[in-house]
Image (cartoon, rainbow, N blue to C red):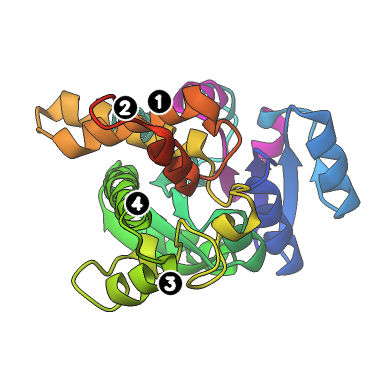
């Protein structure tokens, strides 16, 4: 078992850290939010006085933080004190450029590193079934295996440093587009007098079949249970979808790739959040689309 420093004990990070501890790893955590620290303590996780203290002597250091600026600030504290040969795993969702820069800092300091953002939400974090999209060397990926296997159900090496973040934002850009398409289809079906059940039965088994219809349907009462059946309480918050969609547009701008549908999806999520979508699941955008007037979206 490994000595692991875990920095960022939020809604995702805490259950991930708990699973590592349950598997027998020696986990020392750190967070800046007092409530999260108390929850971690209640689960038996030792709390360090600082991010640097959590990293000292650790064989593996995991970060799960809100954005690239915060990850960069934390790396400035932990890279200088990390034991040479230790592995840094950043499971935050951040921009590709920052991820590549962090790999460079780690390499210069004699550290291994992975960018390893996740998919699967809070439920996947608690169940240990997350998908990890990894970028980094084969050596780093193999060293991470015993820890990632505890936290995840599927672990994919996508390429060199930054490839994990690239995979995450491309996937979630597509998800933002396809969810809006599913919402538009169900909203139009309703206006045309077609029941949601009939629309689901056709679209889920025909050429319109897709994850937002089949697995995460944006209307209640049809298909598998989803946030639509719980008043759109978030499984994946609209704020997080906008974050990921915006990161995709930042990356597209940096490399000069046209993504018109991705760009418009990001704009629609901005409108949704500004018009009642705050605190709702990203599938709740169907409510905004139903209210919107044709030609004014």
- The answer to whether residue 275 is above or below residue 43 is above
Residue 271's tag is: 1
CA–CA distance in space, label 2 to label 4: 24 Å
Foreground mark, 3 or 4, reads 4
CA–CA distance in space, label 3 to label 1: 28 Å
Foreground pick, 11 / 283: 283
Mark 2 highlights which residue?
267
Q: Are marks 1 and 2 in contact (CB under 8 Å)?
A: yes
Residue 191's tag is: 4
Determine whether the residue tagged by mark 1 lies in a helix, strand or loop: helix
CA–CA distance in space, label 1 to label 2: 6 Å
Residue 40 in percent (x, y) is at: 81, 46
Q: Earlier in the sequence, mark 2 or mark 3?
A: 3
Mark 3 highlights which residue?
197
Q: Which residues are magenta?
A: 52-74
Location of the N terminus by quadrant is bottom right
Foreground mark, 2 or 4, reads 4
């Amino acid at each position: 078992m490994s000595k692991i420093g875990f920095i960022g004990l939020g809604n995702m990070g805490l259950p991930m850290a708990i699973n590592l501890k349950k598997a027998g790893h020696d986990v020392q955590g750190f967070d800046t939010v007092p409530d999260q620290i108390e929850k971690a303590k209640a689960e038996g996780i030792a709390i360090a006085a600082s991010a640097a203290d959590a990293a000292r002597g650790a064989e593996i250091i995991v970060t799960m933080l809100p954005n690239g600026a915060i990850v960069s600030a934390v790396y400035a504290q932990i890279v200088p004190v990390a034991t040479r040969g230790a592995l840094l795993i950043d499971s935050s969702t951040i921009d590709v450029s920052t991820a590549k820069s962090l790999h460079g800092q780690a390499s210069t300091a004699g550290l291994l590193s992975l960018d390893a953002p996740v998919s699967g939400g809070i439920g996947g974090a608690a169940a240990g079934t997350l998908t990890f999209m990894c970028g980094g060397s084969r050596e780093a990926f193999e060293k991470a295996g015993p820890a990632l296997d505890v936290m995840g159900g599927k672990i994919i090496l996508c390429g060199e440093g930054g490839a994990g973040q690239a995979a995450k934002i491309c996937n979630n850009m597509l998800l933002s587009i396809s969810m809006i398409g599913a919402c538009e289809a169900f909203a139009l079906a309703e206006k045309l007098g077609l029941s949601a059940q009939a629309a689901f039965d056709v679209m889920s088994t025909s050429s319109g079949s897709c994850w937002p219809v089949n697995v995460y349907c944006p209307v209640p009462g049809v298909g598998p249970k989803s946030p639509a059946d719980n008043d759109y309480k978030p499984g994946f918050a609209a704020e997080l979808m906008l974050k990921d969609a915006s990161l995709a547009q930042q990356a597209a701008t940096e490399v000069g790739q046209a993504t018109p549908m991705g760009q418009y999806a990001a704009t629609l999520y901005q409108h949704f959040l500004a018009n009642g979508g705050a605190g709702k699941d990203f599938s709740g955008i169907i409510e905004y689309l139903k209210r919107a007037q044709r030609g004014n979206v």
